[in-house]
Image (cartoon, rainbow, N blue to C red):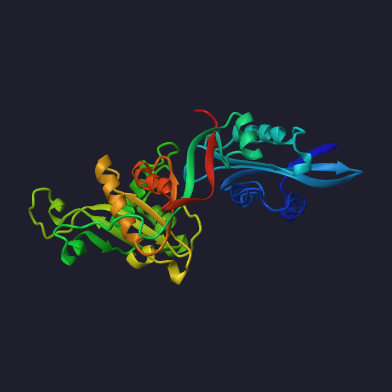
Amino acid sequence: MAIAYREWREGDDLALLEIWGGPETVQAGQFRGTLAPSGNSPWRRCIVAEDVVDGVAIPVAAAVVHEASLHPERLWAYVEVARDHRRAGLGSTLLTMLRHEAAQAPSGVSRLRCKVEPGTPGAAFAEAAGLAPIQRSRLVVVDPAPLKLPVFGDGSESAATDQVEDLATGSVELSDVVGRYYTAVHGWDSPGELSVAAVQRLFLDDLSGAHGAIVLRAPKASAFGHGIAASRKGRLEGFAISYAAATPGADGGADAAGAGAGGSAGPTEVFLGHEPKLGADEARAAVRDLLALIAYQHPVMLELDDAMTALRTVVEPLLESGKAHVQGSETLVVSDPA
C-alpha cells in the first residue's frame, strides 16, 4: 500500500462516497458536509489520503480542521478512513497533519474537538488520540400528557393569560433570554459573544426554522419587585421555541410547540430553556410547567445536554417511567485536554 497525501479537490466528495458508502453514524453524516477545499475565510484545512495502485491514485481517507464562529475556543476536526484501510495508521497520520495545521490557525486556537457516538470505531479512535468527553447530548422524545398541567395564580383564564404568552420570535426580550441561556449551559465550550442579531440568526428567524414561541412569565407584580405598577408584565422565566421540521437544530408558539408543525404526526422539535438567573427550584418549575403545556396533546423532541441541569431534572424521571425515550444514539463531544 502506497499512500500519498494532498489537499482536497473538487470532486473528492463523490470519489470518497463510492469508497466509503453511507455514513456509519449521524455525526459522520454531519461532518462529511464540512469536507471542502482549504481556505482562509473561514479558515479551513482539508487533506485527502490516496492509495496509489499501479500508478492510479484512489482517495480512501480525508480529514478536515476548521475554525467556528460559534464556540470559537476550539477547532472542529474530523477524520474518516475507508473500512478496508483502517488500522494501518492512516487516521493517526491524518490527525497528526491536522494538528500541524491547527498550530498555524490565525485565531491562535489549536485545541481540537469532535462529535462521536459511544461504542463506535470513531469513539475508540478519539479516545486513543487523547480526546476525552466534555459533554453528552441526547435527543429525547416526550410523549403526550407526560405531566400534570400547571395551575397559574387563582386558576382563572386571566391568570393563565398573564403568565403564558405567545411571543413573536423577533422579540428582543426573547432573544436576550435565549442568548444568555445558551451561553449559561455551554460554559464547557463557550459560544463567545452572542449579540441579539446572532441569536436571531441561530435560533429565531425563518432560516433557523423557528416556527413559533411561547413564554412563561412570573406573576405581574414581579415586574417591579414590590407590587408597584403590577399591571406590567412579569419577567420572562421560561421559553419554548418550536421548529418547522423535526430535525436536530442549533444547538430551538403555543399551538406550534404542542402540535406537530404543519400537522405532522411526528414529534415537534422544541428548544426549551429558562432565565439563567433563576434559582434551581424556580428554573426546574419553569421548564416543567412549559413542558407540561407544550406536550399536553402532542409529542415533542428536545435536545438534552447534560449541562442543562433544570431540564434534566424534569426529563430524566420521564425517561425512567417510560413517558419519554431517547431517539437514536447519544452524542459525545470530545476534546483535547485544556
Name the side, left or right, on which 39 lies relative to 18.
Answer: left
Quadrant location of the N terminus? top right
Q: Choose top left, top right, bottom left or bottom right for residue 159.
A: bottom left
Name the side, left or right, on which 257 lies relative to 115.
Answer: left
Residue at the extreme right of the image, as rendered:
54
Residue at the extreme bottom of the image, as rendered:
263
- Number of numbered labels in the structure image: 0
Image coordinates for residue 180, horizontal then vertical, percent: 33, 46
Q: Is residue 264 above or below residue 208?
A: below
Closer to us: 236 or 94 = 236
Closer to us: 88 or 151 = 151
Name the side, left or right, on which 14 lies relative to 317.
Answer: right
Image coordinates for residue 39, horizontal then vertical, percent: 62, 47
Q: Kindly identify the residue that appears in the image at 24 percent across and 45 percent down.
A: 282
Q: Kindly identify the residue that appears in the image at 50 percent across and 55 percent down.
A: 248
Residue 41 visible in the current orientation: yes
Q: Is residue 88 above or below residue 317?
A: above
Q: Choose top left, top right, bottom left or bottom right for residue 100.
A: top right
Residue 170 visible in the current orientation: no
Residue at the extreme front of the image, as rendered:
321
Q: Kindly identify the residue that appears in the image at 43 percent across and 66 percent down.
A: 260
Image coordinates for residue 21, horizontal then vertical, percent: 73, 52
Name the side, left or right, on which 199 lies relative to 10.
Answer: left
Q: Kindly identify the residue that appears in the image at 42 percent across and 60 percent down.
A: 299
